[in-house]
Every structure is written in structure tokens, then in C-alpha cells.
Amino acid sequence: MAARTSCRHFQRRFASAAAAALRPTPAEVWQQRSAVFSREQARQRALYPRVEKIEVSMEGPGLDGSLLIMNRGTSTPLSCARHLTEHHVTNSALALVDGEPWPLHKALTHSCSLRLLTFRDADPTPVNQAFWRSCAALLGQVLETAFKDEFWVELLDSPELPVTSGAFCCDVALDPQLDSWSPSEESLRSLTRAAQQLIHQDLPWEPLEVSPSVALEVFSHSRSKKEEVERKASQSSGGTVTLYRCGGHVLLSGGPLVARTGLCSQYEVTALYECGRGPWGLQRRVQGLSLPLQLQAHHTVWRKLRERAQKPVRVTEPEEVTPPSSPPPPPSSELNP
């Protein structure tokens, strides 16, 4: 029995090593994804060969009635902010275009109304949602580069958690050779340092709306992402999906992200939990906590927030609505003759 177990263990290790030898390195995968992103970005920009002007009607405190003349297909909400003040450039995290959430780096394609959003708005809900989503995206970027090249990392479709959950999360499946790995406190601190380096670089999150075929080419080396692309495209009204690029990392997002990594100030990876086995192997959930640049917390408050973020988050599955059944017919004695 011991010999048979050892043989199976050796076979798994050998199969994993053979697969790793055939698999491109993470750096090669990132380069391929970024190249496809750049190619599609250039193609879309070429759709506007001539300079066409659009009118952008600004909304917000002190801006109502302001009208900016911008360039269709090239000007972005951030371009508009640069025509205002440095305060608008540094503090804006997201925009509303005709009332819809809009990334700051996404080009404007028609005349519209524009409101720049910050974390100190009277209703910060759209910014908070985008911020939490961005923090999870940053965590995924860290996880993809946290391990040696011989170990593959598969980022999974992670649940979108509200800010009130106390933590954001990123679901991941690691190489089977790491099934027995349990992160230490130093491992979590190492992940935190890697995230803080990306924050210090103040990298933009560049959005790009693409067809499913382009997204499938981007994620040609990821089985789970290809399934996620098809699922998100089927749920999209236009049949498209949105990609973001941060540095050399390309990701798939279900909603808008904030403008740049530098808006994430206090940031910490707080916990890692096993979620059982799924189609991609042992699934783990990595959790974290962050506060935006404009909203710093005293270390005692941060400690309490961190304690909460270390607890496993509860993910509420959407309830299925069952249509009510038809009422039974009344007894025969109650029927009209």
C-alpha cells in the first residue's frame, strides 16, 4: 500500500513537472496578453482618424453650467479634469457619464453630461464599489506573480463583496504541488509588500471594451477565464466584456475600476482560506483590507478593521425566485351551479 501511494505521488509530481515544461512562463503569458490588448486598443483608436468635437456639460459643485469642447474618441473624463483644477485631477476616482458609472481613462464617444466622483461625495456608493473591486483586482495581480515560475496560478471569478462585508477577496486555484501549502504571517506580509509596491507606482487602470473573441485570445492560456469571458459576454447587453490593464497585467472586470493604484493607500492582505475543491482544483480565497488615499484611519481604528477583515467573509448567493403556483380550484360545493 505504501509503495502504491508513493508511486501515485511520483506520477502526480512527474505529470505536473511535464506540464510545467510545456507551459509558457508567467512573464510570457503577461507579454502575450498585453500585446493583444495594445493591438486592440490601437485598432479602436484608429476608428477616429479625424478630430471631431463633442460637448461635455460638467456637473457638480461649482461646475454646473460649465461646457467643455473635447475630442470624440480620444478625450476621457480625466482629460476633462485636466481642464479644471489640480484638485479634480488628483481626487477624482470615477465619473458619471449621462448618469452611468464611467472609468476616468475611458474615451468619450458622444456629447454628454459628466460628473467627476470622489471618495468624499455626499453619496460615495459608486466610488466605494469601484474601489473595492479595484482592491480585489490589485490582489489578483499580486497573486499571479507571488510564486515561482514552476507553479501555475489560476485566478478565478471572485464574488463581488460590498464594502460593508469588511474585506475584499480574490479566489484562486494554485498548482497541485501547493495543495499542502499554508501561508504564514510572513507570507501575508510579503503579499502586502508586493501590493504596496504597485500602489507606490501609481499605475493607471486602462479600460478597454472588447468582443468575446478578443478576450478569449487574451486569456487563451486560462481555462477559467475563457469560461468567465463567455459568461460575462452572455450577460452583457452589448455582448462585450471589459478588460483593464495595470502595468503589464491584463484582467477581466465585471464593473468599473478607479483611475489608478495610488488611490489605494492603507492596504493589507489579511487572510487566506480554503474553499474546497472545484473544477480547477483546490480553491482558496484570499482576503484583504484597504482605505482610499483621502480617508486615512488611525492605527487603533485600522487594527479593529483588520481584525474584522481576517474573519472569513460570507458570500450570499442570489436567491432564485420561484413563481407562485396557481391556487387550487375551490371545492365543488363552492362552485356556482
Image (tube, helix red, strand yellow):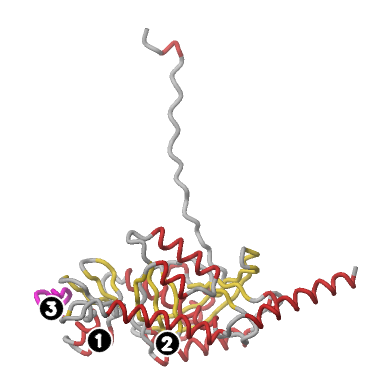
Please state which of residues 234 and 32 is positioned toward the viewer in this rendering.
Answer: 32
Which one is in front in this view, the residue at disc 1 or the one at disc 2?
A: 2
Work out whether mark 1 precedes mark 3 in sequence or the reverse, and give the earlier one: 3
Residue 325 drawn at (x, y percent): 45, 33
Check contact, mark 1 vs mark 3: CB within 8 A.
Answer: no
Please state which of residues 311 and 157 is positioned toward the viewer in this rendering.
Answer: 157
Q: Estimate the spatial distance between the alpha carbons at disc 2 and disc 3, rounded to whole Å.
A: 30 Å
The residue at the point 90 percent across, 73 percent down is 3
* Amino acid of disc 1: Val
Q: Which residue is mark 1?
A: 89
Q: Estimate the spatial distance between the alpha carbons at disc 1 and disc 3, rounded to whole Å.
A: 22 Å
Work out whether mark 2 precedes mark 3 in sequence or the reverse, and give the earlier one: 3
> Which segment is the magenta one?
53-70
The residue at the point 61 percent across, 69 percent down is 283
> Toward which corner of the image does residue 177 lie, by quadrant?
bottom right
Q: Is residue 42 located in the magenta-colored stretch of the structure? A: no
The residue at the point 13 percent across, 78 percent down is 53
Work out whether mark 1 precedes mark 2 in sequence or the reverse, and give the earlier one: 1
**Quarter occupied by the C terminus:** top left
**Quarter occupied by the N terminus:** bottom right
* Amino acid of disc 2: Gly
Residue 281 drawn at (x, y percent): 65, 68
Residue 53: mark in rendering = 3
Query: Does dot 1 land on a helix, a strand or a loop?
Result: helix
Which one is in front in this view, the residue at disc 2 or the one at disc 3?
A: 3
> Toward which corner of the image does residue 120 lie, by quadrant?
bottom left
Q: Which residue is mark 2?
A: 247
Which one is in front in this view, the residue at disc 1 or the one at disc 3?
A: 3
The secondary structure making up most of the magenta span is strand
Please state which of residues 248 and 184 is positioned toward the viewer in this rendering.
Answer: 248
